[in-house]
Image (tube, rainbow, N blue to C red):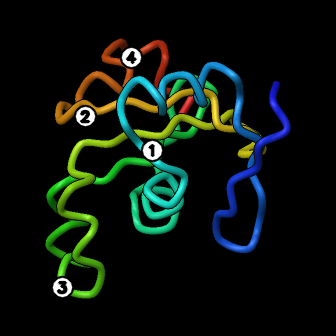
Amino acid sequence: MTNQLIYAQSDYLELSEHAAQRMCQRGLHEWQIELVLKYGREIHSRRAVFHVVGRKEIQKYGSKVPELKKLDGIQVVTGGDNLAILTVYRNHDLRGIRPNKRRHRHLH
């Protein structure tokens, strides 16, 4: 892990080397990740927490924070303990986050 920290909701999250590399590849900055962590919805799945900015968040906070419009589909994955950012990517389809099998519903 790198020593980079990202401030999110009165707490600091450690940025993994993988996440830092993905941010560079995808042209994302730390302030954008902070916005996703602050305004995005949280989805608990597969022992991780997905912070997602979708159209609902843009409708709700878009007039207050216009920068969110450019972050549509950004997903930030943190560990289940919410202490480290594991990866960052853009995907508009949120169905892939939740497991479809009934036997995995206990993980939510």
Q: Please identify the quadrant where the N terminus is shown.
A: top right
Q: Are marks 4 and 1 in contact (CB under 8 Å)?
A: no
Residue 82, position as x, y percentages in the image: 71, 45
Q: Return the disc, 4 or 3, that comes first in the chain's sequence.
A: 3
- Amino acid under disc 4: Arg
Q: Which residue is mark 3?
A: 63
Residue at image mark 1 = 43
Disc number placed over residue 94 in the picture, else none? 2
For numbered disc 2, what is the local secondary structure? helix
Disc with the residue nearer the chain's start (1 vs 2): 1
User: What's the residue at 27%, 68% (across, down)?
Assistant: 67
Q: Is residue 27 left or right of residue 22?
A: left
Sequence-wise, the earlier of marks 2 and 4 is 2
Residue 94 coordinates in the image, percent (x, y): 25, 34
- C-alpha gap between disc 2 and disc 4: 18 Å
Instruction: Tell me the crowding category of disc 2: few under 14, some 14 to 19, or many 20 or more residues within 10 angstroms, Cα based.
Output: few
Which amino acid, mark 3? Answer: Ser
The residues tagged by marks 4 and 1 sit, at their Cα atoms, a distance apart of 17 Å
* For discs 4 and 1, the disc positioned in front in the rendered view: 1
Which residue does the image show at 58% across and 28% down from the upper left? Answer: 19
Q: Secondary structure at mark 3?
A: loop
Q: Residues within 10 Å of mark 1 (few under 14, many from 20)?
A: some
Disc number for residue 102: 4
Q: CA distance from mark 1 to mark 2?
A: 10 Å
Among the two numbered marks 2 and 3 on one chain, the one whose residue lies closer to the N terminus:
3
Rendered location of residue 37, percent (x, y): 51, 58
Q: CA distance from mark 2 to mark 3?
A: 23 Å
Q: Amino acid at mark 2?
A: Leu
* Residue depth check, mark 4 versus mark 3: number of the one nearer the observer: 3
